[in-house]
């Protein structure tokens, strides 16, 4: 979109909504400093949707006649077309997207344009725009999260038998499968989608009609406008309606926590992609090189997912610090909500897509993983638990097995190579490895409780994940129906 | 609680759970630096609840016999009593509350104590403790929020007819009532309670049985233990279960946003309490003085509510920054969750109580508020809307009324004192104030849409708030039933 | 600047620096996701300055001949011109500003362009670019802070005798002057400028020559290049040099604290601008109106200064959370530094300018301030101190004067109207107001210690401030000399 | 320290400093909520130091006689003794450490105690206490940082010839030495110490005498008191002096960035400590085990250093969000500064000590590191640079060497095993490895520019680090001289 500077001369004063009240031209520094167009032009579609619904309501209340309504509708459709195809010209005197649209509408439609702002204020207008935007962003974000869940689920299914050492403290701990590991992220994303749904529900009330802070004396049907815009309810207090940005903070928090989940997955993969681990290989199309070192093949996408996860956190701090201590009701500080919300959602969405793309093609080094998982120390706990099953107190079993591990280390032996005599000296059975105790596949087969990495438990988890994903898709489909149509769809430009 | 230092000598090495594996004594700096007792002793009750349920499960699975179970149960009850009456002695070698309880249990019960840690790890143990704590904290926090809602609702009912200038940009905007203003905060707290409920639902799954990261090979019934602890479900992935702190971050976010709401209310009251506004008077029992200036009477409680609202925000940053980039599964970094969660919830709960107490007794200066609300400029919008109702385009009406305001200002007149000729010159009716246009009560009576400040609308809002509060109380009552009993309740110390 | 999409076809693979190593084309999602052009094109001038100095160094070391150097220099100058006049065409395959400039240089200059990247990496290149940018941003930021100091100082000089109630806890406390109040902000800005200087000093080392992480085997004179770019020193460790973003975090912190200071000044003025205080009047050119309410005149600039002060704080969190836990040396996460730094500095600079503009023209309502400062309660402390000077213990004096204030309040009298008998009953002199005790001007005259609001002390503070400002200007002038010239200044486009 | 609750009865009202002014007893909720003793009792020593200096000043000004001064001095010394040996009894009515000390002093010394608060307010009192605390904390913090530098320097000296692969993007990049790697952290800590010095300088002004906000009418010599407390200057504006917390924010920022540095070092070591890297071994005394898995040996200290690095960041956010938008001058919100400052400094100091201890004893696996560094791909850049030195444009060299790496990879060969024909086909010399090109030690020997990892450069860096450390120690020694003596040192308890 272009910002015209040359034509800014002329009768600038009349361009401002408040030119009756204030005697002097606006200072140009003020004009630049207070303009919100850099951010709120992203709300153009929602602003026009809101105005379309509002003008229908004005007509139904008898505040404008049919011809005026038609002029406004066709004018707004034209504005929407200009915005969509980037032919809309912003003027320096356009303080924000709301005034820009109204100004252009009035140029196109004449006097009817001057009737549009009846019974509303920019305070409830921007609130409704932002709630429309947040509602549809919830759907986009959840959709991108589900896309990633599907990739994870597909890879988990393929790798449900791939042995992998599970780590705690970044130390090898017990054997799991790669499928089980990937499903942990499906779980995290389930919670993310759940939180987004809750946020959507709380954003789903129309503030239109709250006016500047105290409603309006004109007979406008708030519920009808809300329904036309697909809202489930109207807000319950006009002072709160214009100053509430909870849904912005909550959506940004959803992004921040989701992004933290992505950063953890990225970290796993970055570590697995080191030469030392070599658990994964990036396809060349998902790697980057170095400008200096000819041999390099770097996981930049993963590093950026990790690095950018701090963006929604930063946005959340910006929002909450901005809101803190604001008296009621609307204060201009609230304008700063968009900068933070848009950054948080944009980063989270693109990181989700990038990770989905990369995970779709990453290659898992099954042999390296299996070899690492074959370390018999990973089964020290199984040994202790076998002793417990035979009656030994756990703390005794733990101590003796620990001593065996230490002893093997001092002798520079693998645990399963310790001789019978040494086992006996420690107070343990002479050949604990019989019956396949040190076989990681058998260990997994012993772990079949809900949520455990055993093959049947993982198969059940895969089925459960598929069901949850299907339900989430269903929710998106149902909510999408309630979205108002894009403003220029009926346009015959 | 006392931390014994003198008796720390003796066979310290055997005190550690891992003394079999590691050959050397723990470095004392490490011991101090890694100890989490400063924070996790707050989880003592939950730790014992979890262990009680776990020992019942061990018995049911045949892993311990009845006598062992009974020894453990009565030993744990004794530990709970000691903790409750502050006679429990912590040792420097007690790394955390879990090891302290197990150590003391073993002192009291002998070998049975060494069997308690069968089939579990501190990783799932701390997760279950923290979820138990978070669940009950959700109820406490929601309870304190509802207490404040009730005070607000009572005062709103009393002040539903008290005129107050509504402000935007801290400038007088349109008349509202004090009742309407107070109800805005009831709305905010409704959302807070709603978010806490969602958080509670997501915290309400038992991780017990996830073990260190990969479940256990022993036959323990996860669902039975979960039910015994009042959980609705078991977690679905063992790797996720031990490394998930979403519920901690989410509860902290609930606190952060709630605290922001409190800070806004505090700011309103601090401003109203200035000599210049004089809209409220603090009772002497809710004010403080100055150590130097004899005349001072300060609203310290309100300032601290505002100042402390940054604590949950800080905690939230601490948590998310801690979680960012952690690889799966458990890492010791997670220990730092408690410091942040406890600070956030403690501040939010005490701020809620302090505000409830103060609001219960604060005096509203109705006459000052009414006098401020009588400013006829507050009805400039009513005038513009009256012109619109008579057919004038809103932008024209806005500009002309703005010019009238400017003109009155230049003449140093109240708007309703402008002479007929001046009104006409501007293009407006000669006596707009007739029919009570400049009477704020009449203005309110014209504002009866849902959520608006009109008397009937406010009466409806009061009824709605009462209903919502009742429902929230019902939820707390129902959930409280599911809490496990306090561990020492059956104690006969 | 335009981003060409249509011409992106052709032999795209060869456009990447690493096309030898990686066999496949880069995935387009990766290309979009990893591109840093949105942010780092702001470093174009610095990138070319760095390359100009580097090519001179390459020639001096014999790594390129004179003709190659000349080709590079004139090519780079041409690139600078294209960037300056917005005719530079970015390609989708331009990962960042560095590759965009090198790509265009090679188009213009041919093979010499392929020699420019000798002995350096993008890792040290972006570090030098960012340090050059930070150095000059320090000067711009300090300059804008000093501009505000000068406005504050001018207004303070004018208002050095204007009585104002000083406030603590937003309650009237003791009389000060408006000049003294404004000088408090001059002090804060002094510390800000001081911190910026320290930050500049730490940013003032050249990382060029650190290569990717381990320097270079080629004979390049780091100190000469550093000197050519106006750096005082070279960095001391190559691993640190490419991964150090301390100067970014520190500059962002300087912005965050500076912005907090601005937010406090904005808050003072917003409160003073309420109808209830009426201590200031905004000129119409520095106020904005309402789209709905015709009478409104709002202090939006001040609210935005306050609201935007959370942006540098958010940036700081983003930066530190990004840096936390990064292993050595360069990781791609570091790319996210620019987004945060640029947002923080841009907001801080424009807020400084906006406040300077507004403060230049704001009108102070001297009479209102003086009337508020005439409240005799503000002199209760003077009375207590007079009693102390006469030998009474302070705590006794404080208690008795407090009782007098309470008594006056109960009788609904001004403190100086309390009758002699009442004073005596409380144990105080019968007519404490004689000798002008309740005259705020005399109170000020008793407060002449360093930093106090007495007239001579304020006059001294004004002189001191003028000196500090002059010194700060001198520092900027001296440092500006060391800046490398703008890259296209010698261009003959 | 004990908090007595039982004796809190009696004439509670008289305990408050403001009991003259306010007619009612303080509400107990208010008392608990506003008490700052939990945090500010850490300022007890500073509070007494400040009061000692103040009472000397009162005497010198003639405001108290010699006997009164002596009573106060000996009373304060007694209070200091009680506080030091934990026999001081806090009462619930003690709002803060200042009132607690004054209350106890008055119990001990009688009427002289009631004269101590002459000419000062808690506003300047807490400011001076906190600045005294911050000054000495700067010295402690810098000392702990230098301790770590010394350990790093010692280990760097020992390991200056230990080959290590340098990493970028966590991919092996070029050979460095372990000594060079450790010195990178010495550099970071140098900047940290430098920042702490700057912060100390800005904290080093005495606010005493600023009173509540407007100085005092009594003749107190601010400069003498400042000198007695070891301050270099007095603050310049009384309003600023009582509301300035810049030094708190700045010290917390120093901690936050320092902690980020520590988190990076911890991350390096955690990764090196994985089985897959095995570059380090923790001594058993610096490792911990698992409660469940007998074989585990975990680097908990390192994980906590990493996890706790988010605490100072959280504190910083808490502080800046608390300060944002506060009007002048003192507001009670400022009380919340201590909670954040104390948490940040405590974590940073203990993390420094823990890392110093661990690094002192950690074992480096030189052979594993050397073997990893022997990978010939790490010398691909050397090869390209050798070609450049022979006249090939760098981009050509980079592309051809990259192709060789790719070719070797496809053939599953080490780069130095590629046959002559393949080298020639790619356009490179037939045997690039001659002259030891693929020998990492020779590569290092080619890297001797300032800051590079060559042996002579590292030796110079070691000398430089030693000098800087010596200078930092000298600064601490000099500043320590200026600290006031501990308050109870002259006590004859």
Image (spheres, coloured by chain):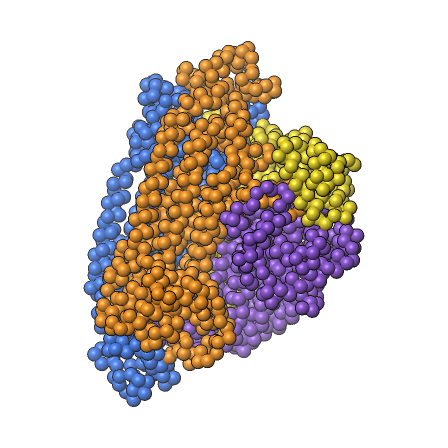
Chain colours: A purple, B yellow, C orange, D blue
Residue ID at (48%, 78%): C9
**Residue C408 lies in what quarter of the image?**
top right
Which one is in front, D328 or B396?
B396
Residue ID at (54%, 69%): A353
Which one is in front, B191 or C279?
C279
Q: Is residue C373 visible?
A: yes
In this picture, residue D153 sits left or right of residue D267: left
Residue ID at (78%, 55%): A65
**Residue D233 lies in what quarter of the image?**
top left
Q: Position of residue B53 (x, y in %)?
A: 58, 56
Q: Position of residue B482 (x, y in %)?
A: 65, 53
Residue ID at (39%, 65%): C81
In this picture, residue B470 sits left or right of residue A183: right
Q: Is residue D304 visible?
A: no
In this picture, residue B406 sits left or right of residue C174: right
User: Among all residues in the image, which is located at the extreme bottom?
Assistant: D421
Which one is in front, D165 or D110?
D165
Q: Position of residue D221 (x, y in %)?
A: 34, 26
Instruction: State how many labels appear.
Output: 0
Instruction: Examine the rendered structure and indicate whether residue D435 appears above or below residue C342.
Output: below
**Residue D361 lies in what quarter of the image?**
bottom left
The quarter of the image holding the C terminus of chain B is top right
Instruction: Examine the rendered structure and indicate whether residue B434 appears above or below residue A100.
Output: above
């Amino acid at each position: 979109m272009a910002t015209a500077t040359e034509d800014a001369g002329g009768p600038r004063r009349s361009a401002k909504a408040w030119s009756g009240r204030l005697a002097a031209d606006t200072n140009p520094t003020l004009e630049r400093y207070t303009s919100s167009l850099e951010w709120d032009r992203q709300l153009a579609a929602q602003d026009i949707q809101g105005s379309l619904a509002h003008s229908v309501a004005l007509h139904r209340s008898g505040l404008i006649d049919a011809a005026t309504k038609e002029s406004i509708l066709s004018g707004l459709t034209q504005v929407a077309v200009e915005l969509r195809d980037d032919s809309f010209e912003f003027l320096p005197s356009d303080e924000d997207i709301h005034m820009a649209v109204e100004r252009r509408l009035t140029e196109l439609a004449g006097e009817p344009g001057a009737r549009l702002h009846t019974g509303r204020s920019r305070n409830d207008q921007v609130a409704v725009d932002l709630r429309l935007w947040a509602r549809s962003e919830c759907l986009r974000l959840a959709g991108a999260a589900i896309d990633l869940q599907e990739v994870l689920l597909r890879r988990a299914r393929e790798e449900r038998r791939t042995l992998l050492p599970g780590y705690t403290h970044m130390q090898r701990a017990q054997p799991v499968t790669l499928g089980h590991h990937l499903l942990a992220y499906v779980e995290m994303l389930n919670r993310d989608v759940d939180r987004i749904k809750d946020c959507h529900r709380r954003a789903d009330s129309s503030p239109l009609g709250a006016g500047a802070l105290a409603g309006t004396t004109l007979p406008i049907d708030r519920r009808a406008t809300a329904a036309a815009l697909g809202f489930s309810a109207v807000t319950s207090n006009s002072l709160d309606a214009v100053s509430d940005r909870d849904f912005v903070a909550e959506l940004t928090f959803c992004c921040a926590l989701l992004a933290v989940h992505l950063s953890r997955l990225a970290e796993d993969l970055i570590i697995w992609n080191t030469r030392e681990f070599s658990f994964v290989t990036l396809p060349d199309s998902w790697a980057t090189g170095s400008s200096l070192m000819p041999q390099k093949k770097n996981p930049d996408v993963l590093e950026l997912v990790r690095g950018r996860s701090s963006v929604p956190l930063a946005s959340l701090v910006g929002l909450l610090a901005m809101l803190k201590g604001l008296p009621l009701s609307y204060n201009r500080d609230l304008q700063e909500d968009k900068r933070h919300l848009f950054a948080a959602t944009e980063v989270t969405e693109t990181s989700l897509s990038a990770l989905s793309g990369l995970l779709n093609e990453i290659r898992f080094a099954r042999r390296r993983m299996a070899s690492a998982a074959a370390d018999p120390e990973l089964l020290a706990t199984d040994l202790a638990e076998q002793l417990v099953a035979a009656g030994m107190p756990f703390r005794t079993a733990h101590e003796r097995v620990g001593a065996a591990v230490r002893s093997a280390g001092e002798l520079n032996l693998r645990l399963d190579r310790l001789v019978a005599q040494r086992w006996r000296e420690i107070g343990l059975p002479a050949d604990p490895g019989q019956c396949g105790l040190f076989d990681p596949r058998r260990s997994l087969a012993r772990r079949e409780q809900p949520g455990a990495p055993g093959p049947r438990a993982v198969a059940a988890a895969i089925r459960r994940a598929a069901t949850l994903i299907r339900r989430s898709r269903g929710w998106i489909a149902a909510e999408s129906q309630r979205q108002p149509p894009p403003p220029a769809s009926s346009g015959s430009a």
